[in-house]
Structures are given as structure tokens and as C-alpha cells.
Image: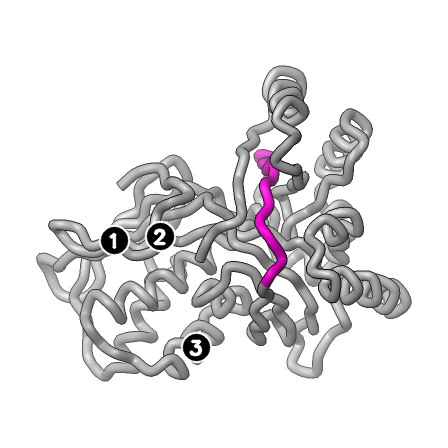
């Protein structure tokens, strides 16, 4: 297993087993409608998969149960704290038997960055177990497991772009929005989604204003309009907890005169570019690398 290409498919049969790719995401917009009686926040967010991916390799296990191995450039827990482990437990419960499997996770994307890699890994685990063991679980069962694993997990069952509402589990696919390229900025900061939501202060007037703008952009099927609005209502809370991210965002925006958007609860940020902006992208990358010392990566919208 290795670094993925845009042309890669999600499922690939291997001599030793099955590889399932788990793409990250960016939030092209993220609105919070308020807190629900169940303690979750009501969301309206546009999520889009990107072609930066983790990989899960499913192989027959030598022992009983799940043998979870974590490799790659980024760290991930190899026990019950990993959503892959919890996904395996839920699938076993759903089918009424203990599935013996070795899953090797190649962790390419860092956690705590708002790119949804843990949620995507969980979705890939459910889909991979279903295919590897020929379980033929109904879509309703797979969706139910995904919802119980986490609010972002259901989005990764399909895609590649959707309007997600409720606590994020209600998925409305978006067609005809077009492709995009983005310069992904990856600060060395791990943000706690739980803390960001706990620190969040709701402003109904801001929500209503942004909702009108976002709905207009969706009606026009315009990614450019979404990028110009650059709406993320979790940004203030995130930046209060991590002031260095606010400074970085302002610095980059002043350098290039274009908006930098926070993905999810952070810490990753991104700038959307047109395909004709090759020279400007190269300049941005050089400054991020040599002047600011910040990790970056060019990504594209994913096909699936």
C-alpha cells in the first residue's frame, strides 16, 4: 500500500486480501443552527471528498477476532480507541458472529485537523468488512452502524459531495457542482472537536444571514461562491482555543489576497484555486514551505 492517486478506485482486490481507500474531506461551508435537546448541534454543512486518502488492507487473521495494525506517516491508536475497532465490533454484533480479520491501516492524514480521516476510516471499515466477508448487509444496516459511529461517518458511505444536515447524518448528494483544486494548509496543531463545540457560542442572526447566502450558492451550483463566502461558524470557537491558527489564517490571507477557509473544527485550512492558477499556487507553496514552515498539500475533489 502507498500514496494514492486521483485515479485510484475505492476498492481494490489484492493477492493477500482487499484494499479499501478512505478519502478525507473539506467543509466548503459549515453552519450551526443551534443546540438540540439531545445535546448535539444542528448543522448545515457542505462536505466534499478530496483525493488524499488513508488505506485499509483486509486480510485473513492468524488468530481470533480483530488484529488491527497501524502504519504510515501519521499516528493512530491500534486498540478500542480507534473507530475501526468500534466499527468491527458493531458489524460483528449486526451479523451475529465474530469476524476474524487482520486490518492494516496506513494512516496518511493526521487526526485532529478537521479532514474527517477517522470518520472516513470507520466508513471504509464497515464497507470493507461487508465486502471482504460477503456479508451482504442491507444499506439500512450499514447506515445505522455509520450513524452510531459518528456524525460525519454516514457522509463517507457515498459522496463525493453532499449537503449534510441534522447532526451531520442526513445526507443530500449535490450533483453538478463541478470539480475543484485546493491548497491544503496543515498546521502542526491537533484540535479537539469536543472542546470546540463546548466553547461555541451560537448567534442566530449570523446563522440566518449565512444560510441565505449558502442556499443561494447551492442554487447556482457554484463552488466559487461557496469559497467566497468561506463560512464556518466553528471558526471563532476554534481560534479562541488556538490563537496561533487565527494569526496564520490572517497572515496567509494578507499575503495572497484570497480567503482561507477552516475545515470542520480545524486545524486544517484551505484555499480553492482554478486550474489556470498554476504559477500562483507554486508561489503559495514556496512561501508556506520556506517562509512560514507550514506543511501543505495540493488536493483535488474526489471522483467517488
Rendered location of residue 17, percent (x, y): 16, 55
Rendered location of residue 250, percent (x, y): 79, 34
Q: Nearer the viewer, residue 284 or 222?
A: 222
- Alpha carbon separation for disc pair 3 and 1: 22 Å
Q: Residue drawn 58% across and 36% down?
A: 186
Helix, strand or loop at mark 1: strand
Label located before the other in sequence (2 or 3)? 2
Region of the chain picked out in magenta, as a range:
176-188
Rendered location of residue 276, percent (x, y): 64, 31
Which circle marks residue 143 in the picture? 3
- Decide: is 227 above or below 46: above
Q: Residues within 10 Å of mark 2 (few under 14, many from 20)?
A: many
Label located before the other in sequence (1 or 2)? 1
Helix, strand or loop at mark 3: helix
Q: Residue drawn 10% across and 60% down?
A: 63
| Dots 1, 2 in contact, CB < 8 A | yes
| Dots 2, 3 in contact, CB < 8 A | no
Q: Disc count in the image?
A: 3
Say whether residue 259 is left or right of residue 294: right
Q: Residue drawn 38% across and 35% down?
A: 73
Which circle marks residue 12 in the picture? 1
Rendered location of residue 80, percent (x, y): 35, 61
Give the residue at mark 2.
Answer: 21
Amino acid at each position: 500500500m502507498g500514496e494514492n492517486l486521483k485515479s485510484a478506485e475505492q476498492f481494490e482486490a489484492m493477492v493477500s486480501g482487499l484494499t479499501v481507500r478512505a478519502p478525507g474531506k473539506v467543509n466548503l461551508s459549515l453552519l450551526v443552527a443551534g443546540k438540540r435537546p439531545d445535546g448535539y448541534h444542528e448543522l448545515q454543512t457542505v462536505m466534499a471528498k478530496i483525493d488524499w486518502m488513508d488505506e485499509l488492507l483486509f486480510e485473513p487473521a492468524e488468530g481470533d477476532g480483530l488484529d488491527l495494525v497501524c502504519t504510515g506517516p501519521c499516528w493512530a491508536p491500534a486498540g478500542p480507541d480507534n473507530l475501526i475497532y468500534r466499527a468491527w465490533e458493531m458489524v460483528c454484533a449486526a451479523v451475529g458472529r465474530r469476524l476474524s480479520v487482520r486490518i492494516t491501516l496506513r494512516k496518511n492524514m493526521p487526526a485532529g485537523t478537521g479532514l474527517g480521516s477517522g470518520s472516513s476510516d470507520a466508513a471504509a471499515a464497515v464497507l470493507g468488512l461487508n465486502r471482504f466477508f460477503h456479508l451482504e448487509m442491507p444499506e439500512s444496516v450499514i447506515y445505522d452502524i455509520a450513524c452510531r459511529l459518528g456524525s460525519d461517518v454516514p457522509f463517507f458511505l457515498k459522496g463525493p459531495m453532499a449537503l449534510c444536515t441534522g447532526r451531520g447524518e442526513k445526507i443530500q448528494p449535490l450533483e453538478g457542482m463541478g470539480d475543484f483544486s485546493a491548497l491544503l494548509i496543515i498546521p502542526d496543531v491537533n484540535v479537539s472537536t469536543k472542546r470546540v463545540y463546548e466553547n461555541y457560542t451560537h448567534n442566530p442572526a449570523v446563522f440566518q444571514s449565512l444560510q441565505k447566502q449558502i442556499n443561494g450558492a447551492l442554487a447556482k451550483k457554484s463552488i466559487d461562491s461557496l469559497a467566497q463566502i468561506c463560512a464556518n461558524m466553528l471558526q471563532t470557537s476554534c481560534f479562541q482555543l488556538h490563537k496561533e491558527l487565527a494569526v496564520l489564517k490572517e497572515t496567509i490571507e494578507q499575503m495572497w489576497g484570497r480567503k482561507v477557509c477552516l475545515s470542520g473544527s480545524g486545524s486544517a485550512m484551505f484555499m480553492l484555486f482554478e486550474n489556470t492558477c498554476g504559477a500562483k499556487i507554486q508561489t503559495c507553496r514556496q512561501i508556506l514551505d520556506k517562509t512560514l514552515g507550514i506543511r501543505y498539500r495540493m488536493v483535488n475533489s474526489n471522483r467517488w
